[in-house]
Amino acid sequence: MTRTVPDPAVDAASFAALFRTIYLTYHRRDGPRSGLTGASRAVLGHLAHTGPLTIGEAALHLDRAQSVVSEIVDGLERRGLLIRDRDPADRRRTLVWLTPAGIEALRRDAEVLSEDALAAAIARMTDSDRTSLLTGAAALLAAAPPPRKEAP
């Protein structure tokens, strides 16, 4: 009995075909992810990375006029995604920060696959297959080459 030696190129092609099918099967199809505009997404994303900021600080980072950022913040605040609060270190300053709904909107906006559809399918898998799926996906990511540095 002859054992076939695994070929990484063949395995890669097989995985790529499976991945395409997985993507097409579980890709979100529930319309716009969060209804966020690019500018709103930029403001929420920046706050998520930096923490609370003044509108002026956010405008400086985003290279937008303070009035434009203020208008974006007003809209996000009306939707319950941001809150304005006095800076405890300097009561003259007002900081803008994400609400729990804002954090959830960012999370949902970044979701490519339908977690609900995946959860339903994974619930039908054996514990062993679930473990193999997650272990294999983690191993694939761990084996990825380091990201290339961008040219200055």
Image (cartoon, rainbow, N blue to C red):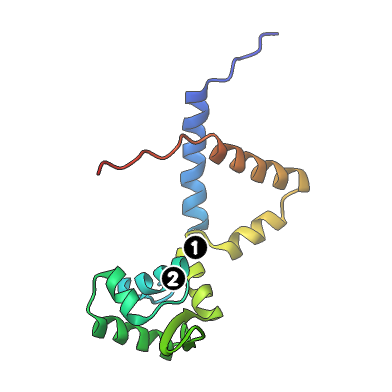
Q: CA distance from mark 2 to mark 1?
A: 8 Å
Q: Residue at x 31, y 74 (%)?
A: 39
Seen from the viewer's position, the closer of residues 125 and 134 is: 134
Q: Residue at x 37, y 74 (%)?
A: 43
Residue farthest to the left?
65
Q: Residues within 10 Å of mark 1 (few under 14, many from 20)?
A: few
Q: Counting residues from the N terminus, which is met first, the one under dot 2 or under dot 1?
A: 2
* Total marks placed: 2
The reply to whether callout 2 and callout 1 are in contact (CB within 8 Å) is: yes
Above/below status of 97 relative to 11: below
Seen from the viewer's position, the closer of residues 24 and 68 is: 68
Q: From the top left corner, tell me how far across and down residue 121 is, in percent.
A: 65, 56
- The amino acid type, in three-letter code, at marker 2 is Arg
- The amino acid type, in three-letter code, at marker 1 is Glu
Mark 2 falls on what kind of element? loop
Above/below status of 42 relative to 124: below
Residue farthest to the top?
1
Q: From the top left corner, tell me how far across and down residue 35 is, in percent.
A: 39, 77
Residue holding disc 1: 111
Residue farthest to the front?
90
Above/below status of 149 relative to 25: above
Work out whether residue 29 can be spotted.
no
Q: Residue at x 51, y 24 (%)?
A: 8
Residue holding disc 2: 33
Work out whether residue 57 can be spotted.
yes
Q: From the top left corner, tell me how far across and down residue 107 is, in percent.
A: 51, 68
The numbered disc on residue 6 is none
Apparent side of residue 115 relative to residue 76 in the rendered image (left or right): right
The quadrant the C terminus occupies is top left
Mark 1 falls on what kind of element? loop
Apparent side of residue 4 relative to residue 144 in the rendered image (left or right): right
Q: Which picture quadrant has residue 36?
A: bottom left
